Amino acid sequence: MTPAAPFVNLDRERAYVSDLGRAFAGALVFNIPLLMTMEMWEQGVVMGRWRLLLFILAGLPLLYGLAYYAGFSKRRGLVNDALDTAVALAVGFVTASLLLILFGVVEWDAPPREALGMVALQAVPGAMGALLARRQLSGDRGGDTDEDQASYFGELFLMAAGALFFALNIAPTEEIVLIAYKASPAHILALIAVSILLLHLIVFKAGFAGQEEADHPAVAFLHFTLPGYAIALGVSLFTLALFGRVDGHSLAGVVQTVIVLGFPAAIGAAAARLLV
């Protein structure tokens, strides 16, 4: 080992500590709305454990994909991306635990089932924030590598991640059901049109990979906008089912609620390339 090698390793360790600190900041910035939402606290207590487990398991490939395209560190490769995923999830758990205790939501004598449920539900969105921290908090957005340049299906994946992040902030609330209940058919049709229009305008400005070839607005509409809106609706249905918002409702009521939540989810899908 050359004399310079220990200093190189020390620099790497310092860089990783800096990345880790940025990951905690990202988890805090991205997750603070959910951590201070009463409905999320309640869901952590009453949600069926199978739903919570399904959410965490579904979140693992999502987090790995974000680690591949962004990651809180610059290190790349299969093993490093998997490590980033695991560390980001740990960051999400630690951040949620500390803040929920600080807020007095999780008390020291709380039943383990309730405490774990509240923390685990918040860990995945916190981990998403941790993985996006390098891009959002360090200004490291230039000089994308080939791995950062997503394929067409990679772009659709990123749209799903953006839709989920936005939907998670709204799906647990009572207001989403109230808006759907108050909306008339004309409101719902107008909301569909506005969702698609805004999604298309943002997608066309966000610099999606492959858009150079799909430069014509009509082609971009078919390649990105319509699939993106379908993804937003699918993610909306998943999150509503996760939080029990479709239980006991008629088919018409479920469809209206999905379309209402599909509005912010579509914005999230369109904004995904602005985040990653």
Image: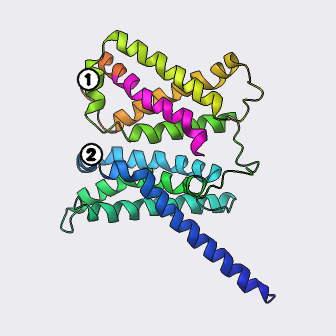
Mark 2 surroundings within 10 Å by alpha-carbon count, few (fewer than 14), some (14 through 19), many (20 or more): some
Q: Amino acid at mark 2?
A: Gln
Q: Are marks 2 and 1 in contact (CB under 8 Å)?
A: no
Residue 246 is at least partly visible in this image:
no
Residue depicted at x 66% and y 51%: 141
Q: Which mark is residue 43?
A: 2
Picture quadrant where residue 272 is located: top right
Tell me where residue 234 appears, x and y as whole percent: 47, 29
- The residue most toward the left is 109
Tell me where residue 255 appears, x and y as whole percent: 36, 20
Q: Amino acid at mark 1?
A: His
The kind of secondary structure the magenta stretch mainly shows is helix
Residue depicted at x 21% and y 64%: 107
Callout 2 secondary element:
helix
Q: Which residues are magenta?
A: 257-276
Tell me where residue 117 appears, x and y as whole percent: 30, 54
User: In the rendered structure, does residue 224 fall within the stretch colored magenta?
Assistant: no
Residue 162 is at least partly visible in this image:
yes
The residue singled out by tag 1 in the image is: 249
Depth check, front residue: 138 or 151: 138
